[in-house]
C-alpha cells in the first residue's frame, strides 16, 4: 500500500477526532486540526495538499480565535471571573467519569452554578450568570465546531484533487 494513502487515512481519522474535540473539550480540537493538516501536507508535498492544509489551518485558527473572543467578551459583560469557569471545568472532568456521556456537560454546569452561588450568595443572580456563561460557551463551541468541520471539508477536497492529479 502506498504511504500517501496510509498517511491520508490516518490524517482523516485524526481530523474526525479533532472535529469531535471541538464539542468534547477534553480533546484538543482546533489545535489537532492544524497539526494534522500541516503534517499531512508536509508528507504528501503536493500543491493541492498544501493549499488544502493552509486553508483548513486558517479556518481552524479562525474558529479557535472566534470562540475565545466570543466567550471572553460575554464572560466580561456578565462579570464572570475565571475562577468559577475553572471550577466548572474541574467538575466537568469529574462528571465525565461519574456520569457517562452527559457527565461532562452536567458537571460543568453544576460546578459553574455552585461557584457562582458561592461568589454571589444569591441563587437567582448565580443562575442568571451561569446560564449566560453556558450560552456563550455553547456559541463558542458551535463556531469552533463549524470552522473545524469546514477545515475537514478542505482536507477532503484536497484529498480528491491530490489523488486525481497524481
Image (cartoon, grey):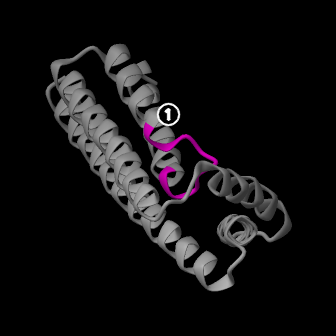
SS for tag 1? Answer: helix
- In the picture as drawn, the residue positioned furthest to the right comes out as 98
Residue 26 on the magenta segment: yes
Residue that label 1 marks: 10
145 in relation to 156, above or below: below
Q: Give yes or no for residue 29 being in the magenta stretch.
A: yes
Query: Which residue is more in the foreground, 106 or 159?
Result: 106
Q: Residue at x 38, y 50 (%)?
A: 67
Other-residue count near label 1 (Cα within 10 Å), few / some / many at <14 / 14–19 / ≥20: some
The span picked out in magenta is 22-30
The image quadrant of residue 106 is bottom right
Q: Quadrant of residue 139?
A: bottom left
Whole-percent x, y for residue 1 in the image: 46, 24
Q: Position of residue 150 (x, y in %)?
A: 27, 50
Q: Please give the name of the residue rendered at 77% of the width and 69% of the height, measured from the top-left corner.
A: 100
* Relative height, residue 131 to residue 78 (above, below): below
Q: Position of residue 76 (x, y in %)?
A: 44, 55
Amino acid at each position: 500500500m502506498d504511504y500517501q494513502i496510509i498517511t491520508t487515512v490516518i490524517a482523516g481519522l485524526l481530523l474526525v477526532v479533532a472535529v469531535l474535540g471541538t464539542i468534547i473539550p477534553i480533546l484538543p480540537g482546533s489545535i489537532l486540526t492544524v497539526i494534522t493538516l500541516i503534517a499531512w501536507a508536509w508528507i504528501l508535498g503536493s500543491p493541492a495538499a498544501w493549499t488544502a492544509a493552509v486553508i483548513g489551518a486558517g479556518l481552524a485558527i479562525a474558529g479557535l480565535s472566534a470562540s475565545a473572543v466570543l466567550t471572553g467578551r460575554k464572560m466580561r459583560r456578565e462579570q464572570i471571573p475565571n475562577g468559577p469557569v475553572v471550577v466548572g471545568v474541574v467538575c466537568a472532568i469529574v462528571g465525565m467519569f461519574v456520569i457517562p456521556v452527559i457527565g461532562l456537560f452536567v458537571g460543568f454546569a453544576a460546578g459553574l452554578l455552585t461557584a457562582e452561588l458561592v461568589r454571589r450568595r444569591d441563587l437567582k443572580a448565580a443562575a442568571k450568570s451561569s446560564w449566560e456563561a453556558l450560552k456563550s460557551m455553547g456559541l463558542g463551541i458551535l463556531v469552533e465546531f463549524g470552522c473545524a468541520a469546514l477545515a475537514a471539508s478542505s482536507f477532503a477536497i484536497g484529498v480528491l484533487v491530490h489523488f486525481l492529479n497524481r
